[in-house]
Image (spheres, grey):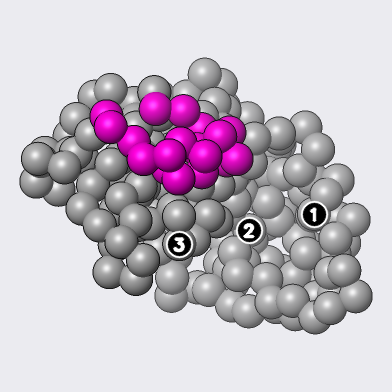
Amino acid sequence: MNLTEDEQHFLSRQGLSECDFLDARSMSKHEWLRVTKEQNKQFIIGSRCRKEGHRLRTRAGHCIQCDTSKIAYSNRYYQKGYVYIAGSLSKKLIKVGGTKNIDTREETLRFQGYGGAFDWEILFFFAKVDSYGRIERDTQRLLAKYKTHEAYIKDDKEQSASEVFKCSFSVAKDALSEAMGDVTSSNTYQDENCNRYEFS
């Protein structure tokens, strides 16, 4: 791939290797998107970015040298994980999210008081789906008209919960099922008390 010394050092610092990359310099975006998906590559060597002239990018085309947060985002977007629906009776909120560890997610949401609620319950999830970050995002887009912003305190700072919706459980579940499409899941869970979360 003819990586420069600076690029090799960057990969080493980020815990990446040449194996994570596709050399896409002679490919169109349509072509590299197809090939990265076929080869399960999350990153490419592409054209130079406008800001600093870097070549290392996510397969969506974002420069990972200018913004290393794109590495974690890309990993989450394409990796296997859980997509879930949680509900709060006290705030009459539904949350759609994704996680690598479903076993501790409910406890974490309650501890954080996410969206100002301390009674979150995991109502439904698809287990170990490919590209769980993409499915989470697509579901949230389908629920955009129900989106609300709820303030809460995290690390002594006021935050805005961005993944909460004023809708019923069944509306959220339909949106999640649509976003899943033909993606398969290793397991599915649904709480027997979901009917309590049919908020109008």
Residue 80 in sight? yes
Is residue 8 inside the magenta stretch? yes
Is label 2 in a helix, a strand or a loop?
strand
* 154 horizontally vs 92: left or right: right
Inspect the image, locate mark 1, and give the three-letter code of the amino acid beneath it.
Leu
Which residue carries the number 1 mark?
Answer: 109
Report helix, strand or loop for mark 3: loop
Total numbered labels placed on residues in the image: 3
N-terminal of the pair, mark 1 or mark 2, is 2
Q: Residue at x 70, y 56 (%)?
A: 87
Q: Nearer the viewer, mark 2 or mark 3?
A: 3
Q: Amino acid at mark 3?
A: Cys
The percent coordinates of residue 15 (x first, y second) are 58, 33
Q: CA distance from mark 1 to mark 3?
A: 32 Å
CA distance for labels 2 and 3: 32 Å
Q: Are marks 2 and 3 in contact (CB under 8 Å)?
A: no
Q: Position of residue 109 (x, y in %)?
A: 80, 54
Disc number placed over residue 95 in the picture, else none: 2
Magenta stretch holds residue 133: no
Quadrant assignment for the C terminus: bottom right
| Residue furthest to the top | 186
Residue type (three-letter) at the residue carrying disc 2? Lys
Dots 1, 2 in contact, CB < 8 A: yes
- In the picture of the structure, the residue carrying the numbered disc 3 is 66
The CA span between labels 1 and 2 is 10 Å
